[in-house]
Amino acid sequence: MSKGIPKHIAIIMDGNGRWAKKRLVPRVLGHRRGAEALDRLLKDADGMGIEHITVYAFSTENWKRAEEEVLGLMNLMREYIQDYIRDNDTSRLKIDSIGDLSVLDEDIQRDIKKLKEISKDKPGINLHIAINYGGRDEITRAVRDIAQKVRAGELSAEDITEDTLSGCLDSAGVPDPELIIRTSGEYRLSNFLPWQSAYSEFWFTDKLWPDFTVEDLKQAISDYQNRDRRFGGRNEGKK
Ligand code: IPE
Ligand code: IPE
Ligand code: MG
């Protein structure tokens, strides 16, 4: 049975470094081309019926990289967030973030907050940018919140359900992604949405992120539509 367009697609935008290496240019230029690829994709995907797109921009593990690269990535994010603020009047995107922003430079934190506020009534795709995001960190922070509520007497331990935890994650209120895409020929989650991806379909491509286009996205969606999602049941009467 053919499925519709996924409501939520999550993307691990990987391979910017290898893209740059192949061309003998600095890694940060690969990241810039990657950011441009995302920009084009969001414009091309507008109107397709996708409600949410979550993109992995910077993981809690990416701080391990050389200082020059981390600085380059932060400056690129700063620039892009400022561009999104500037272009908000003509943009259809509703933008927010997941991940622990508290360790980022204050101006970036402030601009993300501003962007979230000014874009909140936009009619287009909900773009969730994962910055300093790690799934284990997200779950740990959620558990801390829950423990504090229990200690304050606002919640009893017996009443904790899966929904309690989902509701304390950064992604609270956003449906789980039906489809997760990873580029660059790597076959792992790298700490991306481990809770939310429990029943996601995965789609991998060897293409490096800066080369990814809406045609690849359409192929991923078409392959997804031919998958048999069983959720542990048997889908009786279907194939
Ligand atoms: C993904 O590209 C972007 C970030 C992790 C910020 P990489 O920089 O991981 O590219 P490769 O994997 O080294 O090619
Ligand atoms: C995942 O890619 C993080 C982002 C795309 C932002 P990495 O390149 O950091 O993941 P590993 O190190 O290959 O697992
Ligand atoms: Mg990588």
Image (tube, rainbow, N blue to C red):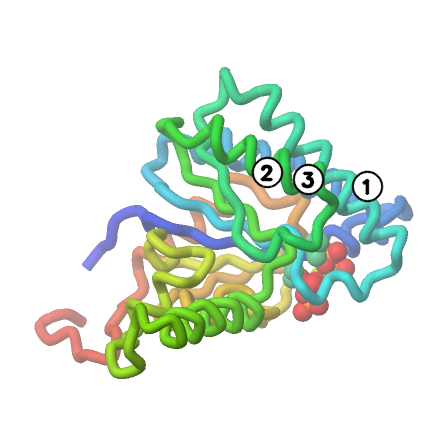
Proximity of marks 2 and 3: CB atoms separated by less than 8 Å: yes
Residue in view at x 42 percent, y 39 percent: 126
Q: Which mark is in front, 2 or 1?
A: 2
Is 216 on the left-hand or right-hand side of 232? right
* Label 2 sits on residue: 112
**Residue 104 x, y percent position in the rendering:** 71, 49
Real-space Cα separation, disc 2 to disc 3, in angstroms: 6 Å
C-alpha gap between disc 2 and disc 1 = 23 Å
Q: Where is residue 180 in the image (x, y as percent from the top left)?
A: 46, 59
Taking the spot 59% from the left edge, 65% from the top edge, the residue there is: 134
Viewer-nearest residue: 108 or 184 = 108
Helix, strand or loop for disc 1: helix
Name the residue carrying label 3: 108
Can residue 184 be seen here? The reply is no
Report the disc number at residue 29.
1
Image quadrant containing the N terminus: bottom left
Please provide percent x and percent y for residue 193: 49, 65
Against 153, residue 205 (above or below) is above
Q: What residue type is labelled 2?
A: Ile
**Disc 2 Cβ-to-ligand 2 distance below 8 Å:** no
The CB of the residue at mark 1 lies under 8 Å from ligand 1: no
